[in-house]
Amino acid sequence: MNARRLARVLGRPLLYAFLVLFAALTAVPFAWMITSAFKSGGDFFLSLFLPAGNGFLGVAWDHLTLDNFRRLFREVPMARSLVNSVFLASVTSLFATLCGAMGGYALSRFEFRGRGLLTSLVLGTAILPVPLLLAPRFELIYHLHLLDTFAGYLLPQLAPAFGVFLFRQAMLNHIPAEIIESARLEGCGEIRIFFTLVLPLVRPMVGAFIIITFLGVWNDFIGPQIILQSAGRQPLAVTLAGLGSNYGNDYGMMMAGTLVSVAPIICLFLLLQKEFISGLTSGTVKG
Amino acid sequence: MKSARPHPAWAPWFFLAPFLLLFAAFFAWPLVRAAVLSLEQTYGPGVGVFVGFRNFAFLARDPLFWTALRNTAVFTVGSLLIQMPVALGLAILLNRPSLRGRAVFRLIFFSPALIGMVFAATLFTLIFEKQTGLVNFALHSLFRGWNPDFPWLEDYLMASLILAALWLYAGFNMVYFLAALQNVPQEQLDAASIDGAGPWGRFRHVTLPAIRPVAGFIVMLSIAGSFQIFVLPYVMFLRTGGAGPLNRGLTVVMYLYKTGFLIGDLGYASAIGWVLALLLVAIALLHRALSHGETQ
């Protein structure tokens, strides 16, 4: 009985202590990355996080430098890669979401011959691993003369079988057939029904899917690595991996590059936490 | 309701058209080509010689492929055994109704899942560095006996990979578990308490059965993801050719990538792709068979 009471008294602080410890372990790599990006080479070796000194809180604030970032943007086409990443991720997420939502709408809210077959085909292929398609897709892009073009990377990303599946589920659950039918009776066109009635009703799914697609493309490495060969067309993921082979020992610069690559995503996440978490846990992006 | 005006016949095909065209061109057709390619030996795209099943016969005796398969299996099992208990444990701690700051903890635990493999790998290359890396630096400051030259990236490749993956995905899996825990019936937990069940008893007999379907799904997803691990080791061991010393960091997809795109044998790469697909389908079928057994 005494042990149980002790557990109850100690339980709460212990619980918080444990959670705080784990949160710290999760946050430390981020903190290390950020502080390393602002330190000179010498300070990197002397201090774990911020360099010690006589400044506020015992930190030598004047030692911190933007030098790593300056060199990063001057010596490497980092600005170009940043623009490329934003471009590829935005275009893909917009059009893949449109394709997926339209496909999911057709498979959920229309009756037509071949629907069952198409649905199981789309679902069945979702289990196949992407690496299986790397070689034949590369060959196809080569034959289409699209190697080293944005189109060669983008086109295969715009037909998301998984997106069709997600939108089909969302529309089955959230769009009553009667609404569509009464819109038709009032003489509303099919395309207008889709854009003004159906899409707003599955808005959370639209947001979630735009986000997971954006994130998937932003973080994709193999796709652009294979298709986009010239430095001017590569996104951040490829540029940063290349940075490792040339500047691998320049820790400050490596961490500045990583920070530049992940900061936009972290900012988006802080703005749209709910959509991010529901989008990511709808069961895709991994690897 | 029967009087409702039917939709025009073209409508579903109009909405399906963009997806179907792209799907046929960049998914279905490559899938057919993947089958044909796996029976060819190629030297870059467009130059292939039909070799029948020789790619698969060679694969069965290819020591590098078996090394890759073993490394991938070790990573998958190790990752699963460490990540799942941590994710479930964190979810259970966060699930206390009276906990303050749950949203903040959830946010922090989840955040690494946003970081792409390349970026995480770059970060962890430096974290596991000798002397200056965060891990060796911190451990040496805490325990003077710790060797600051501890060779994480040279001799403990799988351990460093598993730790990096733990950082990346523990919080991600935790969110799934947290959602599953919402379905645990509170009355049953209370009833078990009244019957004198301790925390462990309640967990075993009430919580675990209630979250089993979701847990099975998470395990499936983790296995499928872990089996395709490529970028994390490829970038973390870049200095040693991507595969690490003695190919101890070589994984199945890395081997596929190297044969297909560094050597140029798209045929052999496709054969590896099919073996990978077969393994994943087998695991999915096994999962289905197991979860069927449970509901009966």
Image (cartoon, coloured by chain):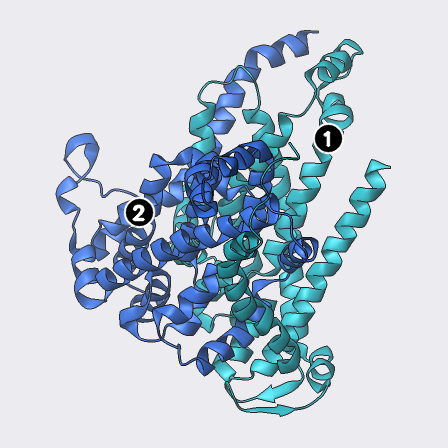
Chain colours: A blue, B cyan
Q: Which of A239 and B24 is in front in this view?
A: B24
The residue drawn where x is 16% and y is 31% is A56
Q: In which quarter of the image is residue B213?
A: top right
Under tag 2, what secondary structure? helix
User: Chain ID for label 1?
Assistant: B
Cα separation between marks 1 and 2: 38 Å
The residue drawn where x is 29% and y is 46% is A34
The quadrant of the rendering that contains the N terminus of chain A is: top right
Amino acid at circle 2: Ala
Residue at the disc numbered 1: B208
Under tag 1, what secondary structure? helix
Residue A155 visible in the shown view: yes
Position above or below: A143 against A57: below
Q: In which quarter of the image is residue B256?
A: bottom right
Q: What is the count of numbered marks?
A: 2
Give the numbered dot on residue B4: none
Picture coordinates of residue A103, whole percent (x, y):
54, 52
Does the CB distance between marks 1 and 2 fall below 8 Å?
no
Picture coordinates of residue A85, whole percent (x, y):
32, 58
Crowd around label 1: few <14 · some 14–19 · many ≥20 (10 Å): some
Q: Which of A61 and A93 is in front in this view?
A: A93
Q: Nearer the viewer, residue A28 or A181?
A: A181
Amino acid at circle 1: Leu
Crowd around label 2: few <14 · some 14–19 · many ≥20 (10 Å): few
Residue B126 visible in the shown view: no
Residue at the disc numbered 2: A263
- Pick out the residue farthest to the left: A62
- A150 on left or right of B97: left
Position above or below: A282 against A102: above
Picture coordinates of residue B92, whole percent (x, y):
60, 27
Q: Which of A182 and A224 is in front in this view?
A: A182
Whether callout 1 and callout 2 share a subunit is answered no
